[in-house]
C-alpha cells in the first residue's frame, strides 16, 4: 500500500490540482491531499472551506483523502504514514522554489522523497492566485476550477 501526500494551500483547488490528484492515483494506492493550516498568505477560503471544496471536487475519485496539517510537512508525512510527497511543476519558474523545498525536507528527514508531476498542457498555466484575480476582475474563471469551486468563489466574492 503506497501513499503519497499532496500538500499545498489550495486557495482554491484548481483543475491543475485535480489533474495531479488523478495522475497520482494511477501510481499510488492512496493520495492524501493535505491543506496547510499555517499559510503565510491571507487566504480567501478558510481551511475548512478549502477541505470541503477539495472533497467535493474529488468525490468521484476513490483513492483520495483530504486532511489539514499544521507545522512541518515532514511531520505530517510521518503522521499520515506517507511514502512520498507530491508537488506539481508547471513551468521552469516553479523549479527553484520546489527544489529548495524538496532538499530542505530531505535534510529534515532523510527518507523524505518528493515526486514531481506535470499537469496536462491546458492546466499548466493555472494557478490559484491567477484564478482569484480573474474572478475578482469579472473574467471567465470557470474553465480553470472544478464546478464546486467555481460556485464557492462566486459566492465568496459576491459575483
Ligand atoms: O500551495 P503552496 O502554498 O505552494 O504550498 C506550500 C506548502 C504548504 C506545501 C509549504 O509551505 C509547506 O510545506 N508548509 C509547511 C511548513 C514546512 O514544512 N515548511 C518547511 C518546508 S519548505
Image (cartoon, grey):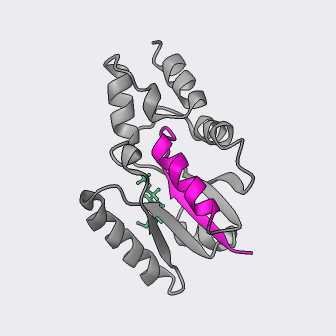
Residue 71 vertical position relative to residue 47 in the rendered view, above or below: below
- Whole-percent x, y for residue 35 in the image: 57, 51
**Left or right: 152, with 32 as reference point:** left
Camera-side residue of 140 and 41: 140
The residue nearer to you, when weighing 126 against 107, is: 126
Q: Is residue 155 magenta?
A: no
Residue at 75 percent across and 52 percent down: it is 62
Q: Is residue 2 magenta?
A: yes
Question: x%, y% of residue 67?
Answer: 66, 53
Work out which residue is located at the far front of the displayed protein and give it. 121
Q: Bounds of the magenta span?
A: 1-26
Say if residue 69 shows up in the picture. Answer: no
Expressed as whole percent of the image width and height from the top left, the position of residue 98 reads 35, 66
Identify the residue shown where x is 75% and y is 75%.
1
Quadrant position of the C terminus in the picture: top left
Q: Residue at x 38, y 21 (%)?
A: 140
Ligand 1's quadrant: bottom left
Q: Is residue 94 visible?
A: yes
Residue at 53% across, 69% down: 85
Seen as rendered, the residue at the extreme bottom is 110
Amino acid at each position: 500500500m503506497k501513499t503519497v501526500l499532496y500538500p499545498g494551500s489550495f486557495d482554491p483547488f484548481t483543475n491543475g490540482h485535480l489533474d495531479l490528484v488523478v495522475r497520482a492515483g494511477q501510481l499510488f494506492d492512496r493520495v492524501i491531499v493535505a491543506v496547510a493550516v499555517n499559510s503565510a498568505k491571507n487566504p480567501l477560503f478558510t481551511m475548512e472551506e478549502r477541505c470541503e471544496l477539495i472533497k467535493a471536487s474529488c468525490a468521484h475519485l476513490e483513492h483520495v483523502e483530504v486532511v489539514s496539517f499544521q507545522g512541518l510537512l515532514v511531520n505530517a508525512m510521518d503522521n499520515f504514514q506517507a511514502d512520498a510527497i507530491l508537488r506539481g511543476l508547471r513551468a521552469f519558474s516553479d523549479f527553484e522554489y520546489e527544489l529548495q523545498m524538496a532538499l530542505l525536507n530531505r535534510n529534515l528527514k532523510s527518507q523524505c522523497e518528493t515526486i514531481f508531476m506535470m499537469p496536462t498542457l491546458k492546466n499548466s498555466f493555472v494557478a490559484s492566485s491567477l484564478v482569484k484575480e480573474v474572478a475578482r476582475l469579472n473574467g471567465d474563471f470557470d474553465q480553470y476550477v472544478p464546478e464546486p469551486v467555481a460556485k464557492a468563489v462566486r459566492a465568496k466574492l459576491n459575483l
